[in-house]
Amino acid sequence: KNQVEQSPQSLIILEGKNCTLQCNYTVSPFSNLRWYKQDTGRGPVSLTIMTFSENTKSNGRYTATLDADTKQSSLHITASQLSDSASYICVVSHFNDYKLSFGAGTTVTVRA
Amino acid sequence: NAGVMQNPRHLVRRRGQEARLRCSPMKGHSHVYWYRQLPEEGLKFMVYLQKENIIDESGMPKERFSAEFPKEGPSILRIQQVVRGDSAAYFCASSPSPGSPTGELFFGEGSRLTVL
């Protein structure tokens, strides 16, 4: 069973609207949780990185939250733009280890 | 400070040929990961290397695939006798300190292999 589960698998939103992506993980203990954005045909680009002691981290219109007790994270996109169309990947690093656990990603499509 | 550099960005090979993909990590990063991504799918772990050492190759097929990260020069992922099923995007990521709470992890733009 994958240690990082993302939902939904995909979603379509209208330009200007908000959306929230979910990431549930079982990795324990963990070092950090990252959200990446991957445009079609490109490499993943880091959006946010949070340690277990952080609850929220923002990067422009992207806001990530983390609840280490329930092992849940979310990525909120505010006032979506067409350029937000991409796959969003949740990655959890294992504590003091090289191992990384990847979610399968959520594909976001923003329509005008 | 250049990012993770991968080359070639696109590679076309005929069945049975060899493919060599190169990855130069970010300056100061001594840890390299290779991932494979099929169309419409997520990233799949292949191998994790430190300088001159393969630490974990559990995600890499035992046959035809090999990886190295020499003391000098880029990390290389080598695929011998390629088959159509090897067609994919291969991503490299580098880190200075995996497992650290603030550890960076940067990806390259990928190398897209097409096997005819």
Image (cartoon, rainbow, N blue to C red):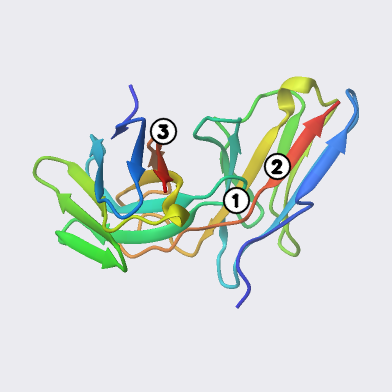
| Amino acid type for the residue under numbered disc 2 | Ala
Q: Which mark is residue B67?
A: 2
Q: With respect to residue A8, does A35 lie above or below?
A: below
Q: Work out whether disc 1 and disc 3 sit on a shared chain.
A: yes
Between tags 2 and 3, which lies in front? 3
> Residue B38 is drawn in which quadrant?
top right
Residue B112 percent location from the top left of the image: 72, 41
Q: In the orientation shown, which residue stands out farthest toward the left?
A: A69
Q: With respect to residue A29, does B61 lie above or below?
A: above
Q: Is residue A47 left or right of residue B8?
A: left
Between tags 1 and 2, which lies in front? 1
Residue B37 percent location from the top left of the image: 59, 35
Q: Earlier in the sequence, mark 1 or mark 3?
A: 1
> Residue A22 is drawn in which quadrant?
top left
Secondary structure found at label 3: loop
| Amino acid type for the residue under numbered disc 3 | Ala
Secondary structure found at label 2: strand
Cα distance between the residues tagged 1 and 2: 22 Å
Q: With respect to residue A108, does A95 lie above or below?
A: below
Residue at image position (51%, 52%) is A44
Residue identified by numbered label 3 = A104
Secondary structure found at label 1: loop
Residue identified by numbered label 1 = A42
Q: Work out whether disc 2 and disc 3 sit on a shared chain.
A: no
Cα distance between the residues tagged 2 and 3: 24 Å
Q: Which mark is residue B49?
A: none
The chain ID associated with circle 2 is: B
In front: A16, or A10?
A16
